[in-house]
Image (cartoon, grey):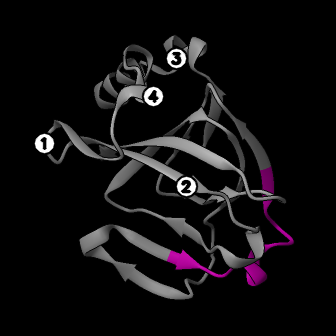
Amino acid sequence: MIVDKLNNLDLYSNISPRIAAALTHLAETDFSKLDVGSYELDGKNLFVIVNDYETKPRQVEPFEVHQQYIDVQYVVSGEEEFGYLPLAQQIPSKPYFAKHDYAEYDYESNKDDAAFIPFKAGMFAIFFPEDMHMPGTSNKPQQVRKVVIKVKI
């Protein structure tokens, strides 16, 4: 997992060409003017999801992992927190669903080992397949606009 501010994106552009393209797209796009929805940048190799939502308490959200895509998440406006812990030997509460590239892990089973990190406007996070993460939470409901760029592995 990587967490940083967008003005430091050059530090991460050498990870892969697709991650570099994702970070460049974040830096060059005014997401406040885009409608909620999905947008292709490079077919299924690189696509963008723009979403508006209200944060939820961490107790009601699951952790998740992906096998086919890396998540590059960027907070456009608002503030949330995300839960994180290494996948290691965790057992999913719902099996991997290949069609949506998603496996779910129970909060209660993992809460004592997880770190919860503030995620503010202008920050991005990169979640790799070994990174369990729980996005979209906070102690009090808040409106957030977030962009997720899915980067094919």
19 up-or-down from 131: above or below: above
- Where is residue 110, by image quadrant? bottom right
Residue 43: mark in rendering: 1
Q: Quadrant of the N terminus?
A: top right
Q: Is residue 102 left or right of residue 93?
A: left
Marks 1 and 4, how far apart at CA:
23 Å
- Residue 111 among those drawn in magenta: yes
- Could you say which disc has been placed on residue 32 in the image? 4
x%, y% of residue 86? 66, 59
Of the two numbered discs 2 and 4 on the same chain, state the one appearing first in sequence: 4
Instruction: Name which quarter of the figure residue 99 lies in.
Output: bottom left
Q: Is residue 86 left or right of residue 141?
A: left
Chain-order first, disc 1 or disc 3: 3
Q: Are marks 1 and 3 in contact (CB under 8 Å)?
A: no
- Residue at 31% across / 23% down in the picture? 21
Disc 1/disc 3 C-alpha distance (Å): 23 Å
The residue segment tinted magenta is 104-116
Q: Nearer the viewer, mark 2 or mark 1?
A: 2
Residue 53 badge: 2
> For residue 9, which numbered disc appears in the image?
3
On whether residue 151 falls in the magenta region, the answer is no
Coordinates of residue 16 in the picture (x, y in percent): 35, 28
